[in-house]
Image: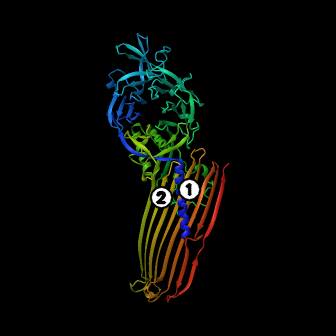
Amino acid sequence: MKRRFNLIWGILLCCLVIAIGARKGLAVGYLKFEQEFGGKGSSNGRFSNKIHLTFSYDGEIYVSDTTHKCVYLLTTDGEYKSQISNTTLGGSVILTNPNDIAVDREKNIYVADTALHHIAETDNPKIYRYAPCVHKFTSDGTFLVTYYITNVDSKSYKLAPSPVSLMVDNEGKSAFAIKLSGFNRELRIDVDRLGQLYVLDPYKGKSSIPSAFIHKFSIDGEKILSFASYGQDNGELDKEASDLVLDNDGNVLIADTNNHRVVKFDPDGNFLLNMGGGRRGRGNGEFTKPLTLAVLADGTVLVKDASQFKRHLGGIPAGGALTLVSPAGVGLADLLSDPLHPERDLLGRNTIFPDLPLNDIAGSDLLDRRLRLLEESEYLRLYETTMLADEAENKAEAAEDLKAAAVRATIYHRIIGRVQKFDSYGNYKGRTIYQVNKQSEKHHDLSFLDLDSMGHLYMRDGSELTIRKYAIEGFTIKPSQMNAVYKTNVNTYDNEYIEDYEDLDLRPDLKHNSSQFRSGANLFWNYDLSERTNFMLADAATYSEQDSLYYIPTRAEDANDFNSHSWDNNLVTNLKFITNPNPYNYKELNLYAERKDGYTYKLDKGAYPELNRQKNEDDGVVRSISMGGNWDIFKNVNLWVQYSDFNPAWNSHNMTRRYYDASGDPYMVFASKNKSRTWTSELTIKF
């Protein structure tokens, strides 16, 4: 028995060692909350729902608010300091569509915007043109200069059929304003140590005339060069490129979103390298639509992509049943099944055809339908469908009701995001992961916002419009990252039967009293060691007692007293590695172990020992273990291996039964002791 206990705990220790080794090898980091600031409002550090952030070299925070048409200056703690708005500018320049923002070493502020520019040498009427631009301000908010991305004085235009609107100029005269396609497009900007401005204008990729994506301006506002064209080759960008950042050497890094890579240029616009390989993926060093970049002081490049991993378990079935899954499928109760794939349990076992092997694909496709960690989309589709079906005035209320119902019916729902790290040569260095608890009233609406050069991550609350700042820290066990369900139950009953047969008196001819006590507890515990490594532990325990007295007054020597007590405990552990998270080439490795222990004692004896000392005494035990692995060797090739030591092999408990006669002397012993050891393996290949 001791050897078997050592074996099962040895397996668990091995799982833990593997997890820790995987964690070290993958350099997993987590986030630590530091502060919260902002919120709904229109002044003094309150924001709208459309903002951009940037940070000075000493950590001060700058917020560009597109809706409120202003720029807020905040302390490192997020406290309001001052602002730049059309009121403070006094007409020197007008903010119309402020979006991306940057700060140089002198704390001059650069804001991407849309300007209304008077085309030179046009009069009676004057002609104005809306065009994307970048405004430059001093640290105290004084306007300095405007950088125009296109040639705004070009006269190669036509008043018709171009979008033209009639307006009144500053002199009260009629004028025309031209709004060419993309006039209010958003730019991405950054400033190098010399005060030279770089502008990413991906909209140009949509033009039928090839144009450069990136523009470099001198400190005086003169355009120095333009580079990077549309395409997928080295040095080319997709039209949805989403971010630009400069490293410590002045090199230019671009989040080439739809090409699933980060492209690096030198300060003169020469192509240097690609990070991520340019192939959509969710593995280490691969990207699924990179969105945001940051460069740390040591040159480390942080990349946030759109990849999201989900941990979701639906509601407990009607009646509150919570069941436990056995990988071996022998002798254990049910545990928790995944509602996204109801025909499979958490370890991939077929629950519709329970007699099929663990990796049998009859009835459903195991290799394609086992638990997948796909991008979050279920709620969004559900909400949008409902909102479109309702009347306009009930849209928001219907969506919120639907969301609340989904939350109430769900045991846990976590979304895991990641930020990957690369060195200056494009080599993968590790990543940081974070969770959003979609069932938390405070945190369910958090979404990624930005990164700073100190490695902090900023999350935005879409409901309250607050900003939460997090620091990266090493691996640690946190209660907030755990998903657990515990269920306990207690049942008791007492019954008394009294019968008087067909005679002339009311004296009872039979008395039968019985009572029973039963209690149970189920625990399901789930922990994400990383976005691709998950540890699950489930335990189901039961204890019961029973007492019964059967008495016939006229035959007291035949009165029978029966009592029993028993306990059973089932323990299942599983360590899951997502070896390839790509949903079209999905592979995983499961290592699992289970243990069942139980004990039963029964005593059936005469109720009055002075009349009858006959009795039957039973005691039985069960000690069984099983361990195995389930490995997707290739996308369509699965190997299952399992070792089992079942004790007993066939019946519920190995029993020893002792019989005593009416004088109390033993006269017979019966024992049932059997066990089996089995190795099982299966190879499944899908064509």
Q: Residue at x 53, y 39 (%)?
A: 423
Give the image location of residue 134, x and y in percent: 43, 24
Residue 572 in the figure: left or right of residue 58: right
Secondary structure state at the residue bearing disc 1:
loop
Q: Which residue is mark 1?
A: 347
Q: Can I make out residue 365 in this image?
A: no
Q: Position of residue 593 (x, y in %)?
A: 55, 61
Residue visible at 46% across and 71% down?
Answer: 544
Question: In the displayed structure, would residue 78 be above or below residue 310?
Answer: above
- The kind of residue tagged 2 is Phe
- Residue 595 picture quarter: bottom right
N-term mark: 2 or 1: 1
Residue 344 appears left or right of 30:
right
Q: Where on the picture, by quarter, is residue 681?
A: bottom right
Q: Nearer the viewer, residue 506 or 97?
A: 97
Please name the amino acid that badge 1 sits on: Leu
Q: Among all residues in the image, which is located at the extreme top?
A: 124
Q: Is residue 540 left or right of residue 443?
A: right
Name the residue carrying label 2.
Answer: 524
In the foreground, 101 or 369: 101
Q: Is residue 45 above or below residue 115?
A: below
- Residue 286, image x, y percentages: 56, 40
Find the distance from the CA under tag 2 to the CA under tag 1.
Answer: 14 Å
| Residue at the far right in the pictured view | 687
